[in-house]
Amino acid sequence: MMNVHDSSCKDQMATCTKHVRRLHAQSSVKERSRRISNSLPGASGGTHLRASQSFMERRTVSVPSKASLQGSLSAGVLPRTASGKVIDEDESQEKKKDEDTTNQLLPTEPSNMTDGMSVSMESLDEGAVCVFPGSGDTAELEDDPDLALLAEEAEAWSVTVDKKTLRKMSAKDIKRQDHIWEFVQTEKSHCRTLKIMQRILAHGMLNEAGLTKDMVDRIFPKLDTLLDIHLTFLRRLTERQRLHSDKSIDEIGDVFVQQFKGDMGERMKTAYGEFCSRHNESVQLYKDILKSDRKFQNFIKKCSRNSLCKRKGVPECILLVTQRMTKYPLLIEPIIKTTKDTRMDSKLLEQALLLARDILNSVDRQVDAREKEHELIEIYNKLDARSSALYKSKKFKKSDLLSNNRKLVHQGYIKWMTARGKPFEVLAVILSDVIFFLSENNQKYTFFSQDNKVGLEKDSMFSELKFSCSKVDL
């Protein structure tokens, strides 16, 4: 402390630097804050992540190191507390009295920013698919306008409208709207399942579990086609709902016919035929990989912790898809029953029901044909290569079972009566052009021919073959 006698003495004193140092310290705080912001995810030049990624707010409160914080805060961005509350800039400066205090918050040793993050961060590498809620594809699914995953849907149309509207309607019309509402809701649920299968399971198998595209396609055959088919259908249904503010639908039969008829109907036959006929193969392949592949096991465990995947593992999702076509007739029938016969919609609904059943029958035939292929392969594998039979004066060998595009029509055990009247169990195999019999010994098949009888063409077997059966499973 110095006493100043008069104004002339002030000129002889050294300038006080305390205020200047304080301003400099405050400036340093701002500069460091700017450098911190630009190094965080979401700042310019950094890694771009969705704002919904919740790991940003679950991060530990510790401040990142100097080494990892390069850049400057973009204009207008203020620092926040761990809870997300904005800190006023003046308040922040008052708490940081000088540059030394600021330096204490920035450790000189590099810190690991991932220490406080969820294990789901393993999936945030470039090109990887995230399988945890609030990040990656899961966040996109939640925001998907087609699915409205976060929106609470009413169980019935009648609970979404006011009582005044319901009093103007008959009980039959209210039930009709409820049945249509149920149809739309189940279609939306089916699309959710397909999107979860595609965006979380299939993409994750490729990018995280390391499966080949061929293997993923074998687990989820025709998945992309099925998703496209059903999203198109769902959009048409929701467009029809939007015609009225209360989401009631006057006519719906034309939308159903458009879906089940023509090109779209053929696409459904092909896609569902492929998917359903390979159901058992898909599930078995999944189980085989799960037993032997540790990386795949870890991926499936992550998916099981995903809120969208709960109670929907791979086998469950596959089963749900195979069942969808069987639901359409059951959903359309009550709509028909509550639709007046005088309405044009009634005829269209009847047509749609027939078309849906036709698709279902086509899928069943494809599933049956696939099963027959496997049965024929099993017979082929068990047949002794040294065994043969006569057919059209030529040897009929093991290799002939699969030649000429032969198809298995039916197989079953019968009891062949020997000349002495003793029953003898043999396997009767009916192919697309020939019938023959096999006997089994030591888990191997051999061609069975009593009294050197030859194999017969299928069309003539009943006229030329004479045998009695005490038990026929054909």
Image (cartoon, helix red, strand yellow):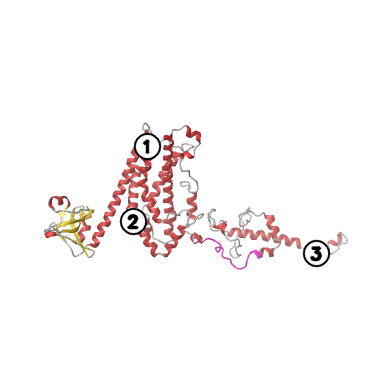
Q: Amino acid at mark 3?
A: Ala
Q: In the picture provided, is 131 more to the left or to the right than 337?
A: right
Depth check, mark 3 against mark 1: the one in front is 1
Q: Which SS type dominates the magenta stretch?
A: loop
Whether residue 44 is visible: no
Which circle, 2 or 1, is nearer the viewer? Answer: 1
Separation of residues labelled 2 and 1 (CA atoms): 36 Å
Magenta stretch holds residue 422: no
The residue nearer to you, when weighing 95 against 413, is: 413
Depth check, front residue: 433 or 158: 158
Three-letter amino acid code of the residue under disc 2: Asn
Please name the residue shown 36% across and 50% down the image.
322
Q: Which label belongs to residue 14?
A: 3
Q: How far is disc 2 from disc 3 in space, using C-alphas? A: 92 Å
Quadrant for the N terminus, please. Answer: bottom right
Residue 34 x, y percent position in the rendering: 63, 58
**Residue of label 2:** 280
Amino acid residing under circle 1 = Lys
Disc 2 is placed on an element classified as: helix
> Where is mark 1, residue-wise?
337
Name the N-terminal-most of marks 2 and 3.
3
Label pair 2/3, CB-CB below 8 angstroms: no
* Image spot of residue 273 (x, y percent): 32, 50
Q: Residues within 10 Å of mark 1 (few under 14, many from 20)?
A: few
Which one is earlier in the sequence, the residue at label 3 or at label 1?
3
User: Is residue 361 at all visible to an observer of this figure?
Assistant: yes
Local crowd size for mark 2, using a 10 Å CA cut-off: few (<14), some (14–19), many (≥20): some
For marks 2 and 1, the one nearer the N-term is: 2
What span is colored magenta in the figure?
104-118
Q: Secondary structure at mark 3?
A: loop
Left or right: where does residue 77 sit relative to residue 438?
Answer: right
What is the secondary structure assignment of the residue under circle 1? Answer: helix
